[in-house]
Structure formats: C-alpha cells, structure tokens
Amino acid sequence: MQVAAVIVDVPSRQTDRPFSYLIGSELTDKVAVGMRVIVPFGRGNRLIQGFVIGITQKPAAETSKLKKINEVQDLVPVLNAEMLALADWLAISTFSFKISCLQSMIPNGLRGKSEKKLRLVSLEQVDPVVRKFFDGKNEQILQPSKTSAETFKKLQKARAAGKIELIYQVKDQAKPKKVRIVSNLLTTSQAEKLKKKQRANAHQLIHLLDFLADHPQIMIQQSVLADRFEISPTAIRSAVEKKWLKISNQVVKRTTYDPQKITATTAKNLTMDQQQVYQSIVTTIQQKTAVPFLLEGVTGSGKTEIYLQLMAAAIEQQQAALLLVPEISLTPQMVAQVVGRFGKQVALLHSGLSIGERLDEWRRIEDGTATIIVGARSAVFAPIKNLGIIILDEEHESSYAQDSMPRYHARDVALWRSRYHHCPVVLGSATPALESRARAQKGVYHWLRLPQRINTRPLPTVALVDMRQAVTQSHDADFSNELLTAIKDRLQKHEQIILLLNRRGYASFMMCRQCGFVLKCPNCDISLTLHKDQRLMKCHYCGHEEPIPVKCPACGNSKIRFYGTGTQKIQEKLQHYFPTARILRMDVDTTRRKGAHQQILQRFGRHQADILLGTQMIAKGLDYPEVTLVGVLNADTSLSLPDFRASEQTFQLLTQVSGRAGRAEKEGKVVIQTFNPQHYALQFAKTQDYEQFYAYEMHLRHQGDYPPYYFTIQLAANAVSEQAAIKYLFKIMQELKTKLSPEAKLLGPVPQMVLRIKNQYRYHLIIKFKHEPQLMEYLHHLLETSQRQKNVQLIIIREPMSFI
DNA sequence: AGCACGCCGACT
DNA sequence: GTCGGCGTGCTC
C-alpha cells in the first residue's frame, strides 16, 4: 500500500511533524512528492490542506488505521526537491513550523482556505436565530468573525440536535483569468468588399472593417482592440452578429507591466571600477561557483548597471537571474530599468500584485518563461530552476528580515540557494550591515568596492543643525531658521525638496496636563496612538481602538494634549510657512490604499509638487533629478532607542536619504536637524564616510559584546501570569548555565520593551555566544518539551533585529 | 489551531 | 438530577 507523509496546515508545535495518509487506489499515480492534498484531520475529520513530503510502500497490515487522502490539488508538484530541502533547513534554523515554511514558498493563491459550511437538515422546530442565519437558504458559510456569540451558540445547539450538518471544505484563493479573444473570420478582400457596402455614416463599422482588412486572421484580446485600435464594444458586438468576428474565452496569465509602454535600453559602457567589479563576479557565473560577494558602492556609483549586465551574463548562459530589492524600492522607475533591458522575460513579485497576478508570475517563473525575476523579500523563494546569479540590493535593509514565522532573513536564504545552485550571490549596499561588512573583512564574503560616484559628481554637502540653539531663534521645535531659509530658496528656484520625519519609536499619544494621565490600551502596556484622519485612538499591537477622548478619563479635566510630532502636524506648519508651496505627504495614513504609495511618488516625479514630506519610506531608491534639498527634521528620535543597532540604523537612514539630493546636474544640500550634533552616527553621516563609521561602530560593538562579535538568540516567554513567564525563563537560564561554555553570556530574564501585549506578559532571555555546537540541539529539545508548559508560550528567535 | 472528552457549578 | 462552563489532550 502507498502511504504519503503529509505536513498538515495546522501551525502548532504539536502538529509540526509528518502525518501518514493512505493513498487510495484511485489516487495512485496522481499523488507525488511536493503536491498539495486535502486530508481529513482530527476527530471531526475536518478537511485541511497538506503538503506531501514523502511517499513510501507499507504492508497492508500497517495501514489499517490510516485515513485516506481526500483529494489531490495539483497535477504537477508545486514544490520541487530544492524547495523541500530549503523548507527543512528553514524550519530547523529559524525554529519555525514546517508548514509555515512550506506555505511561505508558494504564492498565496495556492494556499487553500479552510471553510466551514453549515447545511440545514431539518426545518422542524428550528430556533428563529438559526432560521435568520440561513436566511431562506439551506446552506450557509460560517464566518466566525461575522457571527455573534449568541448565534454561534444557537448554531452549536442545533448541530448537537442534528438539525444542522457541518461540512468542511478547502477552497483555492486564486482562479485563472479568462479574457475574451476576438478572431477575425474575414479575408482582406472580403473585408474590403463589405466596407464598400456600408453606409457612409457607419463610421464605427468602416473603421472596424479597415482594421480587419489590414489584419486578416488576427486573434486579439477584446480589451486591446478597444484600447489600442479604438474599436467600440458595440461595433464588435454587431460584427459578431454579422459573423465577421468570433469571440472565445481563453485563459491568460495576468501581466503586471506592459513591455510596450517601456522604452528599451541597452547596456551602458562601464567605468574602469565598474568593469573590475563586473569581471570578478562574471567569472563566477561562468564557472558556476557559489561565491558570496559584498559590493560596497556609494550612492550613484552605478551598481544597478552592473546588476543588469551580470543578469544578462547569466541569461547568455541559459540561466536565470534573481534580483531582490526592498519592497519600497520596487518603484515603476526601477521596474522600467529592468524591463527596458530584458523585456517580457521579466517576472515581478511584489506586494502590490493581486493574488491572481502573483500566481501567474509565479507560474511564469516555474515553467521557465520568465528568467529575470525581480522581487521583494519573499521572492527569494521564487521557483527558479536554473539560477545563474542572485543579487540582493540594499542588503542592509531590515525589511529583508521577516518578523513573523518563519523568521527568515532573505540574505540567508539567498546564500543557501546560491550553494544549492552553485551560483554567485551579490550583496549590494552603500552602507552594508555591520555583520556583512565584518564577514567581508574576514574573507567569508568576497569584498568589492565602488568608492567613486560614476560622474565624479561630489556628494551633497551635509549640514548638521544644532536644534538646542536653533529652537531659541526660530521658536519652533520642528523647523530651524536654516532649514526654512533653504526651503524658501529652493521653492523660489522651482527645485524640489524632500523632508524626512524620522518617526521610528515615536508616535503621538494623549496626555492630560492636569493629572498626567496617559491613555493606554486595556490589553497591552502601551499608550494608544492618535489617528486623526480616522478620529480614533489605536493600539498598534493588538488593534484595539476607541474614540478620541474630549476630556481626561481619569480626572475629567478637558486640558488634554496630544504629544508627538505627526507628519500631519508638520504638513500644516509647513503650509503655514509656505502658503503657496505644493506639499505631498507620504505616511501610513496617506498610503493605506493600494497603489497610493506609487501614485504619490509619481506625482512628485512629474514635479506636480514642490515638497515631499514623509517617514522612512521616502528615503529609499528615489531618484528625482529636481531634488536639490533634503531635510531631516528629527535625526535623533531613532538614536534614543535602547537598541544596540540604533546608531547603525540612524547612520544608514541618513546616508541613504542624503543620497537623494542632487542626483543630476544640480548640486545637492542636506540639512539634518538634531539635538545631538556631536553624536558619532551623525558626524559620520555628515561626512558620509561608511568605512569610518564601520570602524568606530565595530569598536563599540566589541566593547559591548554585541553582534557581529557574538551570535545572539532571544528566548521570549509569553504568559497570562507574569510570574509564570519569569519562572519558566529562570529555569531555562539555570539549565543553560550548565550547558554553555563560560564565554557565552546570558542576559535576563528581563521584561520585553512592551511588557504586556494582548493580556500576555512578555519576558525574554538573551544568549550571546561565539561557538556552542550543542546549543541548537538543546533549543530544539526545549521547544519540544515546552508544550507541556501549557501556561507559557516559548518563542525562539535567532539573531533578533533588536533586543528590546 | 480546533474539537471532543471530561469534570464541577446554577438551573428545571 | 441535568445543562453547560471551559481545562486538557490528541490529531495519521
């Protein structure tokens, strides 16, 4: 008998192992490793999705107790041997559930959605609430979020009484797209003849016949016919009736860009520096060796052109290329560059795609139609079969690390795949992550540098403004006179301005000036954030929201104030200073709608606004020649965070945003406002000297025993009882002390930055170590046994982004 | 995660 | 005496 090992879609510690299912005779030859199946699971035999990770032969005697696979969802496996091996490695190295790893490798559209359908069996003596739920129909899908607790209970009761039947089903989320294809049934001479017969005022039909005469036997999408050739649907309908045309439905792949709208570009000549870098890397493509490169190149040093030519080299060898960029850098500009060079063999994967578009792009990669793959973090799992090169641009970007299970870093996955495919990886950045730069130092990565800007244009001048003094002059804590003067000057010259509001670890909250009361979330230990546009106070951790109070909930006084600088407030101020300036604001509020982000950038690019005001998201990958001034309003809010990476992140942000000034003919200026002008991160940002920053920061990391000198692991314990969480971690710490070598360091248990979230107390323990061969195994053992510690949930995070 | 089984309080 | 609360433990 054939038995399949199935990883079921139940993300929990206890179900994180293969379950055996019988492959019924009707499914033999239809089930293969890597396919999605639907299986009954648990006592109620509810149907859920699963992945087949192995098939074995078993004697019939051993299979009597096994359940059978219900259905096979694929004709061809969605996961190949590489992906299954990668999932194994990912699950182990990131302490994640296997199912979470597998799910993150396929497009969302292939992820089955479990649904519960209720069927009314008997109409006799049915509770009115239940009757209302079914609303005249005899089947209804149960949506727990939309069903009231009362209805829920009544439904359960009716089910127990046998009046309702519960049906489980698994539904696909994406459907293939069908389009209407118009086929011309006329020959040129027929069309000409018919044209002469038309009445002179039948403009539409004559126009259509002209087209048909010119394009005999053409098959074309109806929408294209309408858009490009301006043939109205009415004319098409009447032509179909006249049997000139035939319309049929055809399954098509949705496209995410239109190559015809993008101008083709050709390879540019490389400078000597670029040529050298290119040569070192291209050799490893040709020799098919897995060499990791760190390409450290200042902004404007022409990294992108090298990427494009390296990808072309891979294509020349009949291999595919993967380019990873941070989500926010995946702008139409960026896409146009790649598509302009490679045309329709480019596949794009980013969050702006619909489920269906994403599925189609994934299929194009999978079947080998697309060989140049550009995408954000999760594109690192693109099902590319024959990889020639992987490029990770802006490799220091924290968005490459996923902060939910599986907590992977795209860089690590890229390195793994490079070893699997025997192809090089290029990690590119102007400001590499310290870890990467240190590895280059040690020779783990092959270090390449581009120290010169391509046109030898000087970097923009950077001015640090000491806000402690500036405030006394301008009487405005947000704008110094120096910045205001600079803005005024650029506005007069019709040049553009980018203003960055560094809002990391910063939000506007409510406080009573009478009694000092701060409005907090009832479930979490965090103050609620003001969302002016939605007229709500919101909790960013659990989603709790409540109306904005008009008087203090504690003392009833109406002297309440909202603290913290929001982009909205800054925009109002700015408009007050410069009444005629056109200001675009980009923050979470204005970009919530899909595509809004791109829209704002495009408007700014077309110079339909003078000032772009925004948070972090405006700092990346924008290249607007008209921008000659970049202002950073509050450089140090991110510095004050109790996090060992605070300086690094501040330096990277400031360097990056500075690079936005003066990219073309005009010289750029950067004004950075700060309350800590003497801080080294700001001083080095002023001189834009990464190497010096690196040396200094490494010295501090060494002193503080921080990464990259130590590896780190965070053990987080969440529990309703504060004592239980502390006690559990304390027990682990005692045990760890006996297992670890003396050079390993343990910190904690200490409360996490936000002590309580969703009514769970959160503590953690940090392990810093250099070489502990037994540690990973012990931690996995810990997770397996932790399920018995019912009241405490243990989460293990390898190399956490911060310790707070 | 769900779902059933099982053991204690407030109702007919 | 039963209904139903949610603690506990298992899912091929």
Image (spheres, coloured by chain):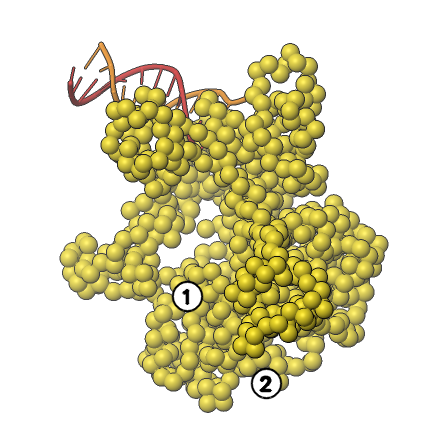
Chain colours: A yellow, B red, C orange
Q: Is residue A511 above or below residue A662?
A: above
Relative depth, front residue between A781 and A639: A781
Q: Position of residue A789 (x, y in %)?
A: 44, 28
Q: What subunit carries mark 2?
A: A
**At 28% across and 24% down in the image, what residue appears?**
A124
Q: Quadrant of residue A620?
A: bottom right
Q: Decide which of A122, A753 is in the foreground and name it.
A: A122
Name the residue that disc number 2 marks: A666
Discs 1, 2 touching: Cβ within 8 Å: no
Whether residue A486 is visible here, answered yes or no, is: yes
Q: Residue A748: where, in percent of width, then height?
A: 46, 42
Chain containing the residue with disc 1: A
Residue A735 x/y as whole percent: 52, 31
Under circle 2, the secondary element is loop
Q: Which quarter of the rendered picture does the N terminus of chain A lie within?
A: top right
Q: Amino acid at mark 2?
A: Lys
Please rate how many residues cluster around mark 1, counting C-alpha atoms within 10 Å: few if below 14, some from 14 to 19, many from 20. Answer: some
Q: Amino acid at mark 1?
A: Thr
Which residue occupies the extreme front position in the image?
A197
Q: Nearer the viewer, mark 1 or mark 2?
A: 1
The residue that mark 1 highlights is: A590
Residue C5 left/right relative to A33: left
Tell me if residue A682 can be seen: no
Q: Is residue A745 above or below residue A601?
A: above
Residue positioned most to the bottom: A492
Q: Is residue A152 above or below residue A176?
A: above
Which residue is rendered at x = 68% and y = 48% of the image?
A366
